[in-house]
Image: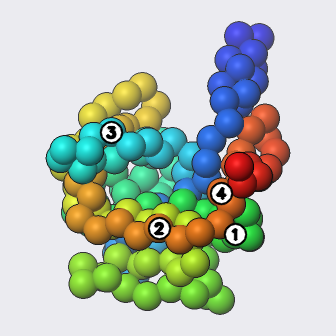
Amino acid sequence: DIDKELRNAFSRFATGVTVVTAIAENGPSGRTANSFSSLSLDPALVMWSPGINSSRFKHFSHAKHFAIHVLSDQQKDICEAFAKNGYAFGDIEHGLNPHGVPLIESCIARFECSHVATHPAGDHVIVIGQVNNAQVRTGKPLVFSSGNYGVIEEL
C-alpha cells in the first residue's frame, strides 16, 4: 500500500520535537508538532504545519500570536501530554506572555511569534510566523524518528 510506504518513508527523517501554544476560546491550548522549521533570518520567520483534520486546527491555523517550544530530552512527558490533550498545562511549569500565549519553561529554545500568513498545503496548512522574541537554554534536544524518541549527544 503506497500510503503506508509513504508514511514509513517520511518517518525516517529525524525531527526535533516542539509544542506550539496559543490562546483558544477555552483558554490556553497546546499541541505537539514536529513540522517546525526556520524560514528566514531577515526578517526572522519560522513555519510549521498543523493538519486540517485536527480537532485543534482552528486554535492554531490563524492564531494572531503563538509560541513554539523546542523540547529537551527531559521533556518527553510534555510532548506526550500535548499530543493527547490540548489543555494539558496542569502540572507543566508555564507563564503567559503579554499576548496571553502560554510559555512553557525549561525548553531548550522558544520562539514567540506573530502570525504572518497561512497557506493551504494538502491535508495541512503552512503557518508562517514572525519571531518577536527567542530564548535559548543549554540541553540536549528531544528527537523523533520512525515512531521512536531519541537524543542527539552533545558533540
The residue depicted at 37 percent of the width and 57 percent of the height is 60
Q: Which residue is mark 3?
A: 39
The residue depicted at 66 percent of the width and 25 percent of the height is 10
Which circle's residue, 1 or 4, is located before the other in the chain?
Answer: 1
Report the front residue among 104 and 24: 104
The N terminus lies in quadrant? top right
Which circle's residue, 1 or 3, is located before the other in the chain?
Answer: 3
Q: Which residue is mark 2?
A: 136
* Amino acid at dot 3: Leu
| Distance between the alpha carbons at the discs numbered 1 and 4 | 9 Å
| Distance between the alpha carbons at the discs numbered 1 and 3 | 25 Å
* Amino acid at dot 4: Pro
The reply to whether the C-beta atoms of the residues labelled 3 and 2 are less than 8 Å apart is no
Q: Which residue is mark 4?
A: 141
| Distance between the alpha carbons at the discs numbered 3 and 4 | 20 Å
* Amino acid at dot 1: Gln
Is residue 31 visible in the rendered structure shown here?
Answer: no
Q: Position of residue 73 (x, y in %)?
A: 73, 63
Which circle's residue, 1 or 2, is located before the other in the chain?
Answer: 1
| Distance between the alpha carbons at the discs numbered 4 and 2 | 12 Å
Which circle's residue, 3 or 2, is located before the other in the chain?
Answer: 3
| Distance between the alpha carbons at the discs numbered 3 and 2 | 18 Å
Quarter of the image for residue 134 reads bottom left
Q: Position of residue 137 (x, y in %)?
A: 53, 71
